[in-house]
Amino acid sequence: MKRTFLFVAASMLLASVSLFADRATVIDFTLLEPDCVSDEDGNPTQNSHTVMDFSKSAGTTFTDEQREIMKTSLALPEWEVTLNSSARNVKSLGLSTVVAAPVSENSKQDFAGKSIMGVRVVFPEWNANACAYIRPPFDIPAYEPLASADENGDRQEPSDEEKASGKTLFEDGYGVVKNVGVIKSIAVTTLGMNFPEALYVLLKDTDGVERRYFMGYLEFDGWKELRWDNPQYISEVRNREIRIYPIYPRGMPFVKFSGFQIVRDANHIGGDYIGYFKDVKIIFDNAVYTTERDIADEDLWGIITKQESERQAAEMARFGDKQINRYLLKQNLATEDSFDDEEEGEEASENGTATQNSSAETGDEVIEE
C-alpha cells in the first residue's frame, strides 16, 4: 500500500512539472508568404495574416488610391537590415537586404517547396568589428485582436470563432508567445554556408526589455538547429528563488521576436554574408498555471486595453510616418536608366526640322494630321 502511494505521488509530481513547462514556435518564416495587396502586375506583396494599415497616420493630402497601398506586413521582402557604424557604407546599405528564399521541392526537409528568410549582408572588407540587425518592418504588437484580412489587406471584424479562441493576431508562429516565465532553451533552424559570423536571437519581453541570446557561429555547411540553453536554469524547484507578481493589470507575460543580430569579428574575412533561416522556437516555464479566471478582470477594468491602445497608437504613428516617408521617396525616385529616349526625341526633332526645311525649299506643304 505504501509503494502504491509513493508511485501515485511520484506520478502526480511529474505531471505537475510537465504542466508548468511548454514549448512553442516564436516565429515561422514559412508562414509569411505574400497573399494580398497585389501590385500593378497582379503579384501579391503583403501577408494577409500580419498586414498593418499605416494610412491612418497619413495626412489629408493623399488620395484614396495612395492610401490603399499604404500597408505593410511581415512579408519577408518588407524586413530591414540595419548596420552599425563600422559596417555602414554606400555599398553595404545598397546591397544588404532580406528576400523570400524558395526551398527546393526535392529537399528532405518537411518545409520543402515553401519560402524561408534569405539574408544578404555586405560587411566591410577591412579589419573592423561589424554587425547587422535583421528587424521586422514594425514592432510586433502583442495584443492585436485576431481577425482575418481580405485580398486588399483590409482587416475584418473578428468572428465569433476568433473571439472564442482567446488568441491574438501574432501568436502561433507569427512573432509572439504568451504566458512565458523562465526561458529554458531557444533553437533556430538555419542553413549554414561556412561563414564565420556569429548569430544572436533578439527577444523582447512584457516590459519592453530586449535581450539577445548567443546561438553560435555559422561556420558549417547544410541545415542545422542552433541551440541556446539557459545556464542559469534551475530544474530543482526547492533551489529556486520564489518571486510572486500581481497577475493583473500587469498582463500575461510574453516574449516577442525582435530580430536577428549577425556579428562579424575584425579578424574574419569580410564581404558578402548569405544566410537562410526557417524558424525560432523556445522551451519555457509557464508563468501562470491556469489562464481561466472566475472574474473577467479586463472586461471589468479595461486597464490593459487602454495601455495597449495607447502603445499601439504611438507605434502606429512611428512606423506609419516612416512608411509614408519611404512611400514619398519611392514616388520621387528616378526611373530612367538611359538617355536613349531623350536622344530619340532629339533625333526626331532634328528630322522634323530637316523635313520642314526641305519642304520649304521645294514649295510643298507639310500637312499635320
Image (cartoon, rainbow, N blue to C red):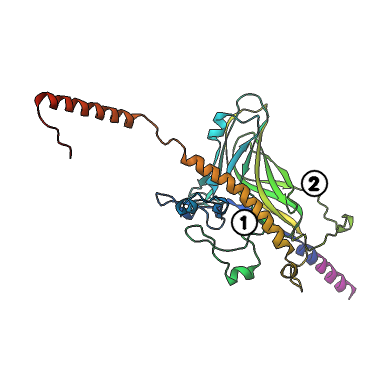
Between 294 and 171, the one nearer to me in the picture: 294
Label 1 crowd bin: few (<14), some (14–19), many (20+), radius 10 Å: many
Q: Quadrant of residue 18?
A: bottom right
Badge 1 marks a residue whose secondary structure is: loop
Which residue is depicted at the point 88% across and 55% down? 241
Which of marks 1 and 2 precedes in the sequence?
Answer: 1
Residue bearing the label numbered 2: 231
Q: Which mark is residue 16?
A: none
Specify the farthest residue to the left: 363
In the displayed structure image, the side of residue 367 where residue 265 appears, left or right:
right
Between 364 and 99, the one nearer to me in the picture: 364
What is the CA distance from the residue labelled 2 to the residue labelled 1? 26 Å
Which residue is depicted at the point 64% across and 33% down? 196
Which residue is depicted at the point 65% across and 55% down? 312
Task: Give the image location of residue 49, x and y in percent.
Answer: 55, 58
Magenta-colored segment: predominant secondary structure: helix
Residue bearing the label numbered 1: 173
In the displayed structure image, the side of residue 305 where residue 193 appears, left or right:
left
Examine the structure image and report whether residue 5 is included in the region drawn in magenta: yes
Examine the structure image and report whether residue 6 is included in the region drawn in magenta: yes
Task: Give the image location of residue 206, x and y in percent.
Answer: 74, 54
Identify residue type, mark 2. Pro
Task: Give the image location of residue 62, x and y in percent.
Answer: 49, 50
Which segment is the magenta one? 1-13
Label 2 crowd bin: few (<14), some (14–19), many (20+), radius 10 Å: few
Specify the farthest residue to the bottom: 1
